[in-house]
Amino acid sequence: MENHLQLTWKFRLSLGMALLIGAFAMFTLERPVFTYPAVPFPTSKAEVLKDLKGAEDKLVKLADDARFSWYGMRDLQGQAAVEQVKKHMSMRGWSYEEQNGSGYFFVKDGQKLVITSQKWTREITVFQVPAEARW
């Protein structure tokens, strides 16, 4: 009986240590892909993370379809990403008009355009850009 109790105690301690080490490694080394939310456009989470890795402070094209392009940027505060979008739009002749919720409104030659943003993760902001304003 004594030997069985000692074995159970050692087993529990070993299991607890293994779980602690695993949890530490999982959340400090690199966040596993499966823990990210679904992406709001037609591509994989792994592809988005690969595209954004090492692309600090610049917008990266993540996906395209006939109507929209999606761009993303690593940015904890979200403001640097918005400023990048405004800069890209200004270079193409669009004037920033206002923000309403997650939408950023631009005007060019009487035409209005809305770019929407989404905070995909705590550090990644994604923008949905209509086809006529792609860059």
Image (cartoon, rainbow, N blue to C red):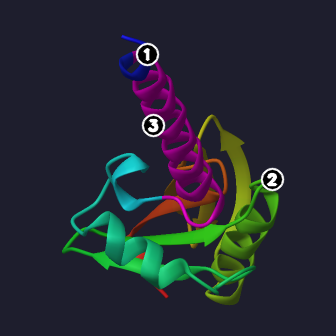
Asked if marks 2 and 3 touch (Cβ < 8 Å), the reply is no
Q: Is residue 16 magenta?
A: yes
Asked if marks 1 and 2 touch (Cβ < 8 Å), the reply is no
Q: Quadrant of residue 124?
A: bottom right
Please identify, in this view, whether the residue under mark 2 or under mark 3 is nearer the observer: 3
Q: Quadrant of residue 90?
A: bottom right
Q: What whole-number distance in Å separates the C-alpha atoms at marks 1 and 2?
A: 53 Å
Q: Is residue 109 visible?
A: yes
Query: What secondary structure is marked by label 2?
Result: loop
**Label 2: few (<14), some (14–19) or many (≥20) C-alpha neighbours in 10 Å:** few
First of labels 2, 3 by sequence position: 3
Give left or right: position of 132 versus 122. left
Q: What whole-number distance in Å separates the C-alpha atoms at marks 1 and 3?
A: 15 Å
**Disc 3 residue type?**
Leu
Question: Looking at this rendering, what residue extends furthest in the top direction?
Answer: 1
Q: Residue at x 67, y 56 (%)?
A: 123
**5 vs 89: above or below:** above
- Residue 118 versus residue 106: which sits nearer the camera? 118
Give left or right: position of 99 versus 60. right
Q: Main secondary structure of the magenta part?
A: helix
In this figure, which residue is indicated by the disc labeled 1? 5
In this figure, which residue is indicated by the disc labeled 2? 77
In this figure, which residue is indicated by the disc labeled 3? 15
Residue 111 in picture, x, y percent from top left: 50, 64
Query: What secondary structure is marked by label 1?
Result: helix
Q: Residue at x 61, y 87 (%)?
A: 92
**Disc 1 residue type?**
Leu
Q: Residue at x 19, y 74 (%)?
A: 66
Residue 116 in picture, x, y percent from top left: 51, 51
Region in magenta: 5-31
Asked if marks 1 and 3 touch (Cβ < 8 Å), the reply is no
